[in-house]
Image (spheres, rainbow, N blue to C red):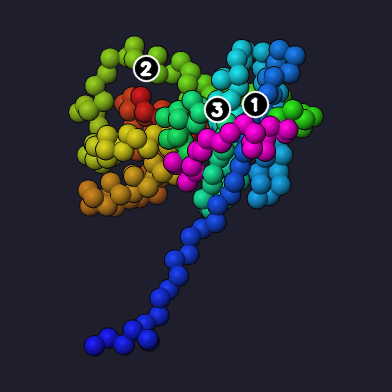
Amino acid sequence: MVDTNNTTIKPVIRKPKNIIYVDASSLRGRFKIGLYDKSNKVKHTLVLGSSIKDINQAERHAVLYGLMYIQKTNNPNRHVLMNDCEGVIEDNQLAGIGYSLNTKLIWIPREINKADKVAKSKINKKKKVWRRLKFFMTIVYGDIPTKIQQVNIDPISDNLSPIAKIVFDDIQESKDRFPMTTADLSTIIIAAFSKGKVELKKGGTAKLRKELSDNHILVIKKKVVMLY
């Protein structure tokens, strides 16, 4: 018989959550976005370019900006990114980025979005921040996929090394994780070397990333990885 009185139950320790709110607002025909990091009391207000014509576009930029903010902070904790536009929160591209950043996107009613007032407050981020956001928005939603569709190349070719073919197979099984970070891709590559029983030498991951890019399997911009 087991003496249950002496059994020690260890508590399950989960990483704390960082709660971040994002929202968009209109300003004399232009749109602004606001971010409020509840945990760190950080507030960002940014005006978007004139190319943004409707509130849904602005809200999408707000959520992507929140994800960029999370990635830049490099905080290992879990994150919750809240926004009051349900259609944007359900966007698969943004959800995929959120997944790679250990971030859950959650819809909330407009009345309780704490970024609402921030989006309407004085601008405190420079134009270069908007240019960076616009660049990443182009990567996620821009014309890169259209250009790729015009290229008729079979990615599984004789040009691929045996390890690259293993990585390609693993990528096909992980499509729902894209877009992902380069760190996530490196994890897949390291696992492929182990699976193929090949020694991973210095510079091996960078060389393999280039091979996958050159063979029109992946698009890698900065630290964001997307499928062709």
- Mark 2 element type: helix
Residue 184 to residue 197: above or below: above
State the residue position of label 2.
148
**Type of amino acid under label 2:** Ile
Q: Can you tell which mark lies on residue 227? A: none
State the residue position of label 1.
24
Give the alpha-carbon distance from disc 1 to disc 3, as whole Å: 9 Å
Q: Earlier in the sequence, mark 3 or mark 2?
A: 3
Q: Earlier in the sequence, mark 1 or mark 3?
A: 1
Q: Is residue 116 on the magenta stretch?
A: yes
In terms of image quadrants, where is residue 48? top right
Disc nearest the viewer among 3 and 2? 3
Q: Which residues are magenta?
A: 99-118
CB-based contact (under 8 Å), mark 3 and mark 2: no
Q: Residue 156: x, y in percent?
A: 22, 28
Q: Between residues 218 and 47, which one lies in front from this camera angle?
A: 47
* Whether residue 129 can be seen here: no
Q: Is residue 172 on the magenta stretch?
A: no
